[in-house]
Image: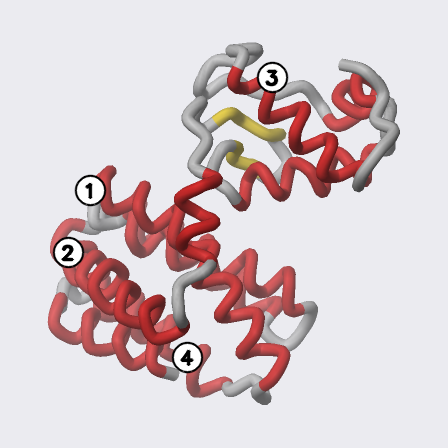
Amino acid sequence: MTPLIKRSLVEQAVDQLRARIAEGAWSVGQRLPTEPELASDLGISRNTVREAMRVLAFSGLVEIRQGDGSYLRTAVDPLQAVQAMSRCAVEHARETRHILEAEAIGLAALRRTEADLQALREALHHSEQHFHGDVDTYVACDLVFHQRLVDAAHNPALSELYRYFSSVVGAALQHNMTTVPRCQVVFDLHGQILDALEQRDPQRAKHLSRTLIES
């Protein structure tokens, strides 16, 4: 990689990393080089590398595992699909969540495993710790919880669709949390959805999910 000199350093780092992925530098599922290694290759700071990796994770190319590193999720760049989703109207995004997320959660109530429930409890605990704190941190935690809800349906197609669509969910959530006072009652709906999954009650799970989407 050549040192970056023009445009935003983050933008250039993202472009170079996308190019290396397209060229097959890493295989799907492979752990990517560490931040110091990438920073040395690109001739930039670790902070810039970290921001670039967040962009790639947001677009679905990379999965960042806390404390473990970053892994290549797919070699097919979903950027165009994500960009198209990000331009959709608020009402269209809400309709899509009702169709995709609420129905997936209904399936999750029927198909969830004990491992799914444990992962959801952990994600909800992390969200609760940050609900009254930094917005970006909370949104990241909340998206993990919602993704795990959809993953508990054990339908890979639904999981992948929601993973791409979650960028729209995250943007809407971030906007709401910076313009409307945070409401504990709304957050508590997450725990109630988890309870419905534990009780294998798909109708209640879907109802609570729709209530949360409209909140």
Return the x and y of residue 114 as percentages of the image width and height.
Answer: 26, 48
Is residue 123 in view from this perspective? no
Disc 4 from disc 3: Cα separation: 43 Å
Task: Between residue 175 and residue 15, name the one nearer to us.
Answer: 15
Q: Looking at the image, is mark 3 or mark 2 nearer the viewer? A: 3
The vertical placement of 13 against 215, above or below, is above
Q: Quadrant of residue 134?
A: bottom right
Which amino acid type is marked by label 4? Asp
Q: Which residue is mark 4?
A: 188
Q: Residues within 10 Å of mark 4 (few under 14, many from 20)?
A: few
Q: Residues within 10 Å of mark 3 (few under 14, many from 20)?
A: some
Q: Which residue is mark 1?
A: 155
Q: Secondary structure at mark 4?
A: helix
Taking the spot 62% from the left edge, 68% from the top edge, the residue there is: 130
Mark 3 / mark 1, whichever is N-terminal? 3
Return the x and y of residue 193 as percentages of the image width and height.
Answer: 29, 70
Q: Is residue 122 left or right of residue 194?
A: right
Mark 1 / mark 4, whichever is N-terminal? 1
Disc 3 from disc 2: Cα separation: 38 Å
Whether pointer 4 and pointer 3 mark residues with C-beta atoms closer than 8 Å, the reply is no
Which amino acid type is marked by label 3? Arg
Q: Is residue 201 left or right of residue 197?
A: left
Is residue 32 in view from this perspective? yes
Label total for image: 4
Disc 2 from disc 1: Cα separation: 9 Å
Tag on residue 147?
none
The vertical placement of 151 against 184, above or below, is above
Task: Between residue 115 and residue 143, name the one nearer to us.
Answer: 143
Q: Which residue is mark 2?
A: 107
Task: Between residue 5 and residue 141, name the one nearer to us.
Answer: 5
Q: Which residue is mark 3?
A: 20
